[in-house]
Image (cartoon, rainbow, N blue to C red):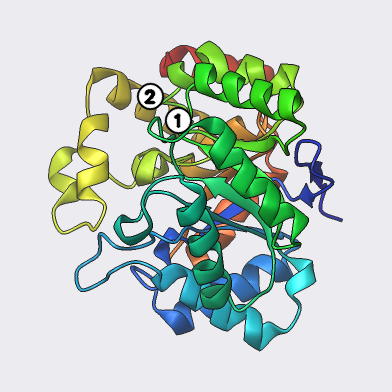
């Protein structure tokens, strides 16, 4: 049986790996996406993360593609209640920002593309300093009251702004952000560990980390910058090839070899084992790749391996 984890105080439970839907309709076409999703749920995993902006950066794409593909799969499968469905608002140019009017319009657009009448978690995709927190949280509150959203989350919020938002929710009796979505992995650690991790623990928030494999850097697939030629992720990856990143890859490969695992499995298992983390988000574009990633959920990292990884990642 899959060991489920509580997602903050939302009442939702998720498996220790979240499927990142940014690939749907971009690097994974619809038939491939359906095969990936089928395999994911067959293995007992249940949480899927997407956003209205996915994948507007792809050639010939405008945004909304991921939600559309995912919605088609949900309609075909006919078991919406088995899935913890997460999407986001605020970062897509046609629906940018966190004003009440934008949130209330964007949620209906997302629900239509996803072919469902409710979202399990609706994230503010990024902070919007131009809109009062009271307005944003009030809009989310109305969506919760209407049954369109079960819980709300904050992605790309600083610890200071998240603390302010939690204080506003408490003072005004509004739903609070139950889930945080930060950039966090073996390489990108300081922002989360310096403030958000403690805040999440103090307030019993769920945490689902994105870029958990550093856009593929921590899979060990790319050994040098030259290996990125022709990769759709080249723009995301180049900054990791510094001295610290290369040292981290060496240690990651060493630990993986000792455990009979892959670097990706070790990197994900390390995130899964962090005390403040509920589950990392990761994506795959083939069933074989997905099977590898799901193997992280059953990989045990001994204390000496964790110590090596911690030291190399700092």
Say if 304 sits above or below 232 in the image: above
- Residue in the image at 81% along x and 37% along y: 9
- Give coordinates of residue 275: x percent, y percent: 70, 23
- Secondary element under disc 2, as helix, strand or loop, is helix
In the figure, 81 relative to 160: above or below? below
Numbered mark located on residue 217 in the image: none
Please give the name of the residue rendered at 51% of the width and 66% of the height, measured from the top-left corner.
Answer: 288
Q: Could you tell me which quadrant the N terminus lies in?
A: bottom right
Q: Is residue 79 visible?
A: yes
Dot 1 lies on which element? helix
Tell me if 42 is positioned left or right of 97 in this view. right
Measured as percent of width and height from the top left, residue 208 is found at 60, 40
Q: Quadrant of residue 209?
A: top right
On the rendered structure, is 202 left or right of 207?
Answer: right
Residue 91: % across, % down? 37, 49
Q: Are the residues tagged 2 and 1 within 8 Å (C-beta)?
A: yes
The residue carrying mark 1 is 252
Residue at left 79%, top 70%? 81
Residue 200 position in % (x across, y down): 67, 23
- In front here: 286 or 254? 286
Label 1 neighbourhood size at 10 Å, few (<14), some (14-19), many (20+)?
Answer: many
Please report the residue visible at 32 percent of the width from the left and 61 percent of the height from the top: 94
Image quarter where the C terminus lies is top left
Residue 208 can be seen, yes or no = no
Q: CA distance from mark 2 to mark 1?
A: 6 Å
Q: Which residue is denoted by mark 2 in the rendering?
A: 248
Q: Is residue 204 above or below residue 46?
A: above
Disc 2 packing (10 Å; few <14; some 14–19; many ≥20):
many
Q: Is residue 297 left or right of residue 154?
A: right
């Amino acid at each position: 049986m899959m060991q489920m984890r509580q997602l903050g105080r939302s009442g939702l439970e998720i498996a220790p790996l979240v499927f990142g839907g940014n690939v749907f309709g971009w690097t994974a076409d619809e038939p491939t996406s359906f095969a990936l999703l089928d395999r994911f749920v067959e293995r007992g995993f249940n949480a899927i993360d997407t956003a209205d902006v996915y994948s507007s950066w792809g050639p010939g794409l405008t945004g909304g593609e991921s939600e559309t593909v995912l919605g088609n799969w949900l309609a075909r499968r006919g078991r919406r209640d088995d899935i913890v469905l997460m999407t986001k608002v605020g970062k897509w140019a046609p629906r940018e920002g966190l004003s009440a009017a934008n949130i209330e319009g964007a949620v209906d657009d997302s629900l239509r593309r996803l072919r469902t009448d409710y979202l399990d978690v609706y994230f503010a995709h990024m902070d919007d300093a131009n809109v009062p927190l009271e307005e944003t949280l009030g809009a989310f509150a109305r969506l919760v009251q209407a049954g369109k959203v079960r819980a709300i989350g904050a992605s790309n919020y600083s610890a200071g702004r998240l603390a302010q938002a939690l204080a506003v929710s408490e003072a005004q009796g509004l739903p609070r952000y139950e889930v945080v979505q930060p950039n966090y992995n073996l390489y990108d650690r300081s922002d989360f560990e310096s403030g958000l991790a403690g805040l999440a623990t103090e307030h019993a928030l769920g945490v689902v980390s994105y870029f958990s494999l550093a856009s593929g850097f921590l899979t060990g697939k790319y050994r040098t910058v030259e290996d990125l030629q022709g990769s759709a992720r080249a723009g995301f990856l180049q900054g990791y090839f510094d001295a610290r990143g290369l040292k981290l890859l060496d240690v990651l490969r060493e630990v993986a070899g000792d455990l009979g695992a892959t670097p990706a499995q070790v990197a994900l298992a390390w995130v899964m084992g962090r005390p403040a983390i509920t589950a990392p988000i990761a994506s795959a574009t083939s069933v074989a790749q997905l099977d590898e990633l799901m193997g992280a959920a059953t990989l045990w990292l001994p204390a000496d391996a964790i110590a090596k990884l911690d030291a190399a990642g700092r």
